[in-house]
Each structure stands twice: as structure tokens, then as C-alpha cells.
Amino acid sequence: MLDSLYRAGVFTVYQLTLVVGILLMPLALMAGRLGVPMPVGDLVAAAGRAYESTA
């Protein structure tokens, strides 16, 4: 029970980071043109690895 609840929570966090990454895409592109790196991709990748490790 607790394991499935944890897996659902990690999946929710993963989905939220994808949505945030998509919503911040214009800002990340503009920041990239200015030379400021945005670590949104790293955040999504870390959440993806955490979700894959629960499966």
C-alpha cells in the first residue's frame, strides 16, 4: 500500500516537472539567448530517474 502511494507521488512530481518545463520553455529559450542556463532539463531528468527506479 505504502509502496504504491509512494510510486503515485513520484509519478505526480514527474508529471508536474514536465508541465513546468513546458510552461517555462519560452523563458528558457530567452535566457539561453542571453547566456543564462536554465536547469529545467536536469530537474525533469532527475524526476524521471526517480520514477523509473520505483517501477
Image (cartoon, grey):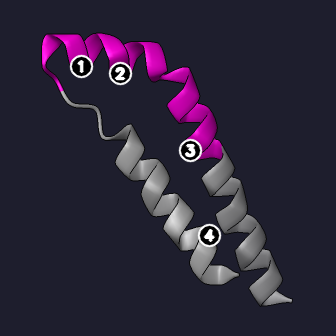
**Residue 7 or residue 48, whichever sits in front:** 48
Q: Along the line of sight, which residue is nearer the eye, 1 or 50?
A: 50
Tell me the residue that label 2 is attached to: 28
- Mark 2 is surrounded, within 10 Å at the Cα level, by few (under 14), some (14 to 19) or many (20 or more) other residues, namely some
Q: How many numbered dots are placed on residues in this image? A: 4
Q: Secondary structure at mark 4?
A: helix
Q: Is residue 3 above or below residue 40?
A: below
| Front residue (pair 4, 34) | 34
Q: Check residue 32 in the rendering and tell me which mark sits there, or answer none.
A: 1
User: Relative to residue 37, is residue 44 drawn left or right?
Assistant: right
Query: Where is mark 4, residue-wise?
Result: 51
Q: Earlier in the sequence, mark 3 or mark 1?
A: 3
Q: Which residue is mark 3?
A: 17
Mark 3 neighbour class, 10 Å CA radius: few under 14, some 14 to 19, many 20 or more: many
The Cα–Cα distance between marks 3 and 2, rounded to whole angstroms, is: 14 Å
Q: Residue at x 48, y 50 (%)?
A: 44
Highlighted range, magenta? 16-36
